[in-house]
Amino acid sequence: MTIKDTVPPVDALRALLTHGDPAVRQTAALVLGAAGAAASAAAEDLVELVADADRTVAARAVEALSAVGYGADAARELLAPLRAEKAPVGPHATRALAVLVQDDDEPRAALLELAKDRDASVRALAASGLGRLAAPRATELEALGDLLGDRDANVRIAAVTAVRELKELARPLAKEIDRRLAAEKLDNIVRMLEFAKRNLGG
């Protein structure tokens, strides 16, 4: 038996999305996401939850919206604070945003912005999101190349890992990888760069 076989009525879960306890709101969003398209009636409620003060709850709402087929709406709501420059998106929301990449232009554009965020954990998650792309564009590869030289080692590791996941799709970064190999001081990242370069093929 899976979680989908035991999902409570959608209306009951929708009511829990406004519960005073963030853990309850988070769980309700998680279960609605597991229900997939069967929970599409909760989409409007989930879109509102993307603005939740608790960013973990907001991230779960985005993931749920993606699962029920409303990913574009989730992306727009998630990006509103960033567009208005009212608040940083934060690592939890960035992780959720990475779920929405691929053919939707809004989350793809957002990842490019988040790749320059002042929070290193956000930049690292943006790198991971870029590594999920099935057909990265030149601007996205350029952003990933910049992250290969990030001042934070964890961001550089995330960027190299993304390059490895893209394999031959990251071939335009070959010269950039050579430059980073010459400049990198940490042996473990040097080894990762060397492996990534071999993984480019061609």
Image (cartoon, grey):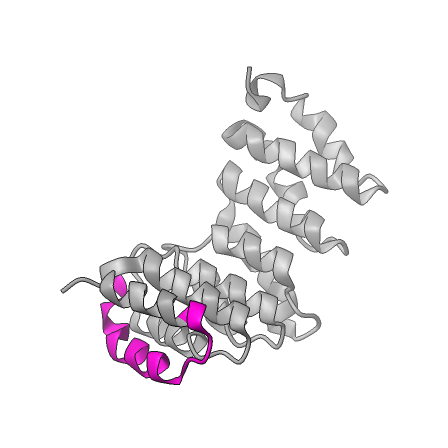
Using the rendered view, name the quadrant where residue 21 is placed.
top right
Q: Is residue 177 magenta?
A: yes
In magenta, the rendered stretch is 169-189
Using the rendered view, name the quadrant where residue 122 is placed.
bottom right
**Residue sitting farthest toward the top:** 1
> Camera-side residue: 139 or 81?
139
Q: Is residue 156 magenta?
A: no
Q: Residue at x 69, y 51 (%)?
A: 56
In the picture, measured across the screen, residue 111 lies left or right of residue 135, that is: right
Q: Image quadrant for the N terminus?
A: top right
Main SS category, magenta section:
helix
Q: Image quadrant for the C terminus?
A: bottom left
**Residue sitting farthest toward the left:** 202
Q: Position of residue 19 (x, y in %)?
A: 82, 39
Examine the rendering and report whether any part of residue 109 can be seen.
no
In the picture, measured across the screen, residue 179 lies left or right of residue 198, that is: right
In the picture, measured across the screen, residue 164 lies left or right of residue 116, that is: left
Q: Residue at x 34, y 84 (%)?
A: 182
Judge whether 116 appears above or below 36 on screen: below
Q: Position of residue 201 (x, y in %)?
A: 18, 62
Q: Position of residue 85 (x, y in %)?
A: 66, 75
> Camera-side residue: 131 or 29?
131
